[in-house]
């Protein structure tokens, strides 16, 4: 009679799936960005294209019984979510596993959740260690849109209100605020314009996230307010695990061997996750200009020193003439070139910026990368203005 027992190997995939699900949910809880942003369905490839509304239809008064009806159109642009990989290896001596009187996973899992949450938040909020495939971080994007508030002599209550106004003028409703843990105390002591506690006010009712995983830099911003439903993320690859027992683990910086698992009687757990994020920022009736339209705004610190550099994308045609009105997407931020053919963006020092240039009459988009160092940078882009065929 064949063996009808469900063995450990038969159930292993289910066990892994359950652990994977728990870690994903734990990471989302640890990450303030993931807990505030809107999650999209899982990605089916490493790049997902979104269709974003780019122009609105127009309607016209007829003014007479026999006037000809005029035409209008709508247009959609494309934005991409690029999946980037987070990974970690956790080495464990086999003797520890053999002698442990407690669940090793119970100790390891929260640390992985915390580390992944912090890594994602750093890249998303301030651009620390941002992968090249990610769009510009939230703070840099706000700076490029000019949606900043410098407190000056204003109270924090007034500054938050001014930041909310900038979001509202872009056609969005503010539903949340994020900042460091020091923001908790500021909210407890905050008074409105009449000198009363803010209890029950619109600012008090905002969904607040206080970033306590070390990912927030209070020297760069006090807080960010915005419509957090406009920031989206998607997971390409759920948490996956692989137990290594014969590998050599090297220091990525030096190449030196740190552990030889077989020789050191160790095993190592390799954990991998792939995900991406984007801010679609579709056109709306209040603000058609995407260079200034943005669903977030920032209240800067009282003393703020610009930590980013200017990157100029200079667009010319094949005859070396400046191209005005070309659309430049630089790390997810979109601006049109001026009469000199320039579009200027803020970017983090020592980073890689990806750009896409489109213009009326182009045969195909021009795509490239800019290596941003510690000073201003100019990237010259030559486009072909033949009749567009695709």
Image: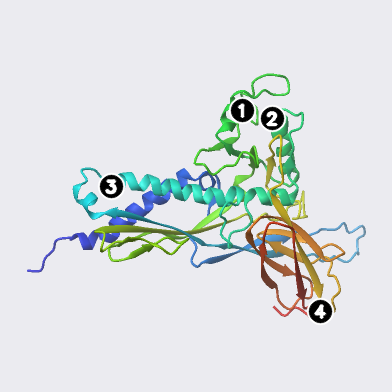
The percent coordinates of residue 389 (x first, y second) are 72, 80
For marks 2 and 3 on the same chain, the one whose residue lies earlier in the sequence: 3
Q: Which of the 4 quarters of the picture holds residue 304?
A: top right
Mark 2 or 3: the one toward you: 3
Q: Residues within 10 Å of mark 2 (few under 14, many from 20)?
A: some
Q: Residue 45 at x, y = what percent?
A: 50, 68
- Which mark is drawn over residue 104? 3
Dot 1, crowdedness within 10 Å: few (<14), some or many (≥20)? Answer: few
Mark 2 touches mark 1? (CB < 8 Å): yes
Sooner in the amino-acid sequence: mark 1 or mark 3: 3
Alpha-carbon span between mark 2 and mark 4: 51 Å
Q: Is residue 242 visible?
A: no
Q: Are marks 2 and 4 in contact (CB under 8 Å)?
A: no
Give the residue number, with chain letter if any, for mark 2. 156
Q: Position of residue 229 (x, y in %)?
A: 59, 47
**What residue is pinned by disc 4?**
318
Work out which quarter of the rendered image holds the C terminus and state it.
bottom right
């Amino acid at each position: 009679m064949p063996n009808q027992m469900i063995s450990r190997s038969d159930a292993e995939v289910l066990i892994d799936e359950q652990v994977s699900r728990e870690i994903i949910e734990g990471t989302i809880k640890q990450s303030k960005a993931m807990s505030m942003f809107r999650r999209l369905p899982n990605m089916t490839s490493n790049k997902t294209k979104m269709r974003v509304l780019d122009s609105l239809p127009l309607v016209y008064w007829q003014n007479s019984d026999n006037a000809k009806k005029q035409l209008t159109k709508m247009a959609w642009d494309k934005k991409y979510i690029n999946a980037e990989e987070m990974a970690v290896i956790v080495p464990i001596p086999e003797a520890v596993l053999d002698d442990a009187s407690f669940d090793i996973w119970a100790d390891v899992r929260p640390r992985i959740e915390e580390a992944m949450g912090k890594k994602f938040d750093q890249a998303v909020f301030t651009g620390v260690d941002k992968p090249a495939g990610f769009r510009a971080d939230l703070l840099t994007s706000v700076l490029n849109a000019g949606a900043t508030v410098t407190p000056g002599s204003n109270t924090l209550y007034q500054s938050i209100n001014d930041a909310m106004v900038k979001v509202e003028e872009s056609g969005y409703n503010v539903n949340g605020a994020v900042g460091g843990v020091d923001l908790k105390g500021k909210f407890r002591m905050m008074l409105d314009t009449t000198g009363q506690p803010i209890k029950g006010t619109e600012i008090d009712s905002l969904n607040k996230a206080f970033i306590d995983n070390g990912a927030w830099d209070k020297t760069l911003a006090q807080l960010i307010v915005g419509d957090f439903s406009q920031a989206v993320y998607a997971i390409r690859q759920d948490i996956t695990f692989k137990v290594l027992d014969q590998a050599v683990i090297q220091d990525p910086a030096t190449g030196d061997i740190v552990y030889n698992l077989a020789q050191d009687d160790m095993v190592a757990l390799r954990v991998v996750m792939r995900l991406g994020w984007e801010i679609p920022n579709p056109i709306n009736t209040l603000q058609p200009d995407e260079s200034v339209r943005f669903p977030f705004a920032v209240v800067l610190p009282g003393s703020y020193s610009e930590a980013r550099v200017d990157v100029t994308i200079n667009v010319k045609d094949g005859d070396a003439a400046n191209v005005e009105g070309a659309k430049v997407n630089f790390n997810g931020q979109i601006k049109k070139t001026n009469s000199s053919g320039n579009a200027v963006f803020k970017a983090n020092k020592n980073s890689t910026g990806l750009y896409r240039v489109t213009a009326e009459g182009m045969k195909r988009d021009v795509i490239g990368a800019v290596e941003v160092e510690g000073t201003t940078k100019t990237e010259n882009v030559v486009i072909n203005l033949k009749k567009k065929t695709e």
